[in-house]
Image: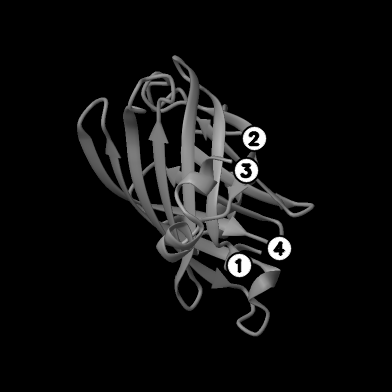
Amino acid sequence: MALFLRGKYIGFYKTGTFEAVKDVFRFGKSAENKVSLEITRKDPKTILGKFLKLESNKMTLHPLDDSEPRQGGKVTVNRLHFDVRTLTFKSQTLYGIYGDDFVQFAEFNGSSSPLDDEERLLKITESIDDSDDIITKSTFRFENDTLSYAHEVNEKFVDPELVSEVAENQLIFSPETTWGERLFYGVGNQNM
């Protein structure tokens, strides 16, 4: 399923000190076995929807069997992250696994890549509360034509006020219209 992630999804949930945030996830295919993911987080309670963070992720899927990529494999995620609240920019590489019904990737402690160490990589499936190796973990699950998202944080390594946990929440698919459709059907009809 990870190879077929396309479109725009929206999530509303409580994170950290915010009662509600609005995350917009935009998925697209960028190349063979590559999926792009853009994440925008806003505070919907402010008048103009104050930006909280911007993120650009490029997921590279490494299937265990090249003839059956949907069976699962390893994931490498190159992330560019900008936190508007702290005005910090971060570039990092995350590692994980994927299957037919999930994609899971994490920020690992240390400079060595867990991509070649399967025992270390599979720690991603365990709870990160007691882990000395996993800093943050993101999970996307596909079930009954729905997509859900969760983000776990290991408080040993990061400040939960700045990098907050997100309990598993179902994302809402948001079909996008082209500028031609908006022009043809009229701006007034979009509010009906």
The mark nearer the N terminus, 1 or 3, is 1
Instruction: Tell me residue 47's x, y (percent).
Output: 35, 21
**How packed is label 3: few (under 14 Cα within 10 Å), some, or many (20 or more)?**
some
Instruction: Tell me residue 5's x, y (percent).
Output: 58, 62
The mark nearer the N terminus, 1 or 2, is 1
Task: Please give the name of the residue rendered at 36% of the width and 24% of the height, measured from the top-left corner.
Answer: 162
Q: Nearer the viewer, residue 43 or 161?
A: 43
Q: Residue lying furthest bottom in this view?
A: 67
Q: Quadrant of residue 135?
A: top left
- Please name which of the two marks, 1 or 3, marks the residue nearer to the observer: 3
The reply to whether callout 2 and callout 4 are in contact (CB within 8 Å) is no
Task: Please give the name of the residue rendered at 55% of the width and 63% of the height, measured from the top-left corner.
Answer: 74
Amino acid at dot 4: Asp
- Please name which of the two marks, 3 or 2, marks the residue nearer to the observer: 3
Q: Which residue is mark 2?
A: 169
Q: Which residue is mark 1?
A: 4
Amino acid at dot 2: Asn
Q: Which residue is mark 3?
A: 172
User: Real-space Cα distance between discs 3 and 2?
Assistant: 10 Å
User: Real-space Cα distance between discs 1 and 2?
Assistant: 20 Å
The mark nearer the N terminus, 2 or 4, is 4
Is there any visible trace of residue 133 in the rendered image? no
User: Real-space Cα distance between discs 4 and 3?
Assistant: 20 Å
Q: Which mark is residue 141?
A: none
User: Real-space Cα distance between discs 1 and 3?
Assistant: 16 Å
The reply to whether callout 4 and callout 3 are in contact (CB within 8 Å) is no
SS of the residue at dot 4? loop
Task: Decide if residue 49 is on the left or right side of residue 65.
Answer: left
Q: Which residue is mark 4?
A: 100
